[in-house]
Amino acid sequence: MKVHVEIQREYIKTDVLIVGGGIAGCFAAVKAKEAGADVILVDKGSVGKAGQTPHTNTFAAFDPTRHDIEHWMDVCNTTGDYLNDRDWSRIVYTESTDRWADLVEWGAYVYRWDHNGVPYECVAKEPSNDPMVVMPLNPKGMGTVQFQQSYRHPPRKNSLVMRNQCLKVGVKIMDRVTILDLLKQDGKIVGATGISPDSDKLLVFQTKAVVLCSGPAGLKSPGLRCMSTGDADAMAYRVGCTITGKEWEETHPVRCDFPAWPWAVKDRDRLRTFAGEMKPNTPTLDCEEHVTGMHWSRLATHHLEAFMAYEGITPAIWQTCTGMSEFAEMHNSPKGYPRSELDERLAKSGRIRMVMGRALGQSAHVADGLWPINKDCESEVPGLYAAGDALGARACGAEYPGQGFATAYCAVTGARAGTAAAKRAAGIEETALSEDEVKRSSDYIFAPYERNGGFSAQWVTQLMQSMIFPYYVIFVKSEERLQLALQQILYVRKELIPKLYANDFHELRLVHETINMALNMEMKLRASLERKESRGAHFREDYPKRDDPYGLMWIKLKDVDGEMTLTHEQIPEKWWPDFNIPYAERYRRRFPIHINGHQAEGVEDN
């Protein structure tokens, strides 16, 4: 029998609390501090080392002296199947260079290309004949052409550069602190609560503004080297915020023989399909991503193996390309781990087997999150802001627009959210925390810790993975299979989640991550059911075509009296495509219905 222990509290005051220490969180913290606020930045891991930021390696920066903003916007609009908020897209592009300039000033590193097209790493401030040294549009050995130029950089070094800048300007960093709940009084956010494995207390933060920068919502896929568990979306949803963008799918592949191995950290996308050249992250309108002679959507090209499996054609064999990494890094096995005879044979010719979903259960880059009510990244609940992958600003539409867009988006939205949060903090009085609200939060957080037994977080997480991960649920969707998966997730939320238990604070963090992931999977399945068409990174077998103008809307999820409700917001007509343009020109990307059968989404349709 577990002995009941009274949980002590530690109260911490600050003007602005930033949750999540990636690109968005660091920019939010620095800008809030520079605006005069007292700032605390917390991360469940270590700021600069945790989350997805250490694995990002490009930064798209628009330069008005050499780039055409309308071209960049046109590609973003069409790549996203016209579902992007064009005001936000333009903001990201126009402010991206200033944010890169911030990184350079802070001491960021960058790759440059010599006259032979060979990259080398250097400090970005290092003098150069070119004031803006970027990745070439057609770099040697990459087999891809980019519509936008991006800075290529060593992400782990720059993550630490951002951490150091936070410390330099006076931001207080608290590593290994997990925020689990938001404190809401009089209709506004007044603080947050969390735990740390290094403490036996409930950490109670009293603050005037909270900025959520803790990443997207995934399901702990072994293919991703970081675990984004949707904490921001779940906490915000529980206090009354609207969430959007859940129907889209993450579109990076992973090796099927070693899905958890972080192979090709620098060049994770240097692949092409064996059936024909594949050009990852290439949203140009005239790109030649040919599979059976048609232009395919990013979902189709990156998850060709899902459609091949649907036809009973496996395995999907991919050809590696040379890039910045050594060629061998693409197809060698982790040291000391044997490979199958098939994989050894394939490796000799530079080929590997791939499976869909580096981050299964996650939406496409910066596609989902809290719905902002303004361009300050503010939510419907006063005092709560979001940035980066936690912000559903719809700057990209139904597909990811290109290399480096997510890092620019995180930097731009982080800076905006941090500045706005500091301004709010400067203009309001401190709110005394209600004992009832703190007790409610404490009871919620420690309920699993007080139980004498039950289900482990790991087991329930694995159970949900088995429900969501199959290609015929998450990639090739249908009403019947989505409904079946939804009923299973609802059972998990109703019957298993209330029986989760934890023996220590580390397990307690895992339990709450599982609670948040279950909520997000319900959102994902409901949104996928709600969008009765195929568009971008969302494919419905029973609705295999885009449906204009019905599909030109955003799906919003919100808790109303304890029920998850879904509503639509139509995209402004001024952003709709011209319906007089033939379908094949309006949408250059195709969805397959059958890969090898000759039936597919025809260019004459619609």
Image: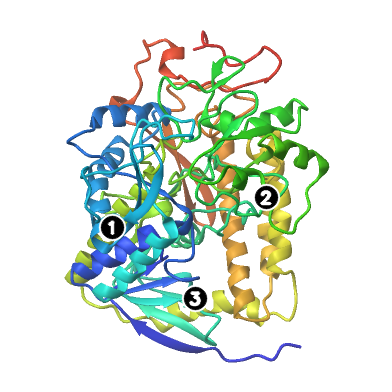
Q: Nearer the viewer, residue 240 or 288?
A: 288
User: Quarter of the image holding residue 355?
Assistant: top right
Which sits earlier in the primary sequence, circle 1 or circle 2? Answer: 1
| Residue lying at 48% horizontally and 81% vertically, measured from the top left | 439
| Residue lying at 19% horizontally and 37% vertically, measured from the top left | 64
Give the number of the disc on residue 295: none
| Residue lying at 57% horizontally and 45% vertically, measured from the top left | 524
Labels 3, 1: front one: 1
Left or right, 584 with reference to 165: right
| Residue lying at 19% horizontally and 65% vertically, measured from the top left | 423
| Residue picked out by circle 2 | 259
Q: Position of residue 404 (x, y in %)?
A: 39, 44
The amino acid at mark 1 is: Leu
In the picture as drawn, the residue positioned furthest to the top comes out as: 604
Left or right, 260 with reference to 34: right
Tag 1: Cα neighbours inside 10 Å, few (<14), some, or many (≥20)? many
| Residue picked out by circle 3 | 176
Q: Is residue 147 above or below residue 212?
A: above
- Dot 1: what SS? helix
- Dot 2: what SS? loop
Q: Nearer the viewer, residue 134 or 476?
A: 134
Real-space Cα separation, disc 2 to disc 3, in angstroms: 27 Å
The amino acid at mark 3 is: Arg
Labels 2, 3: front one: 2
- Dot 3: what SS? loop
Q: Is residue 7 above or below residue 237?
A: below
Q: Nearer the viewer, residue 451 or 471?
A: 471
Which sits earlier in the primary sequence, circle 3 or circle 1? Answer: 1
Real-space Cα separation, disc 3 to disc 1, in angstroms: 25 Å
| Residue picked out by circle 1 | 103
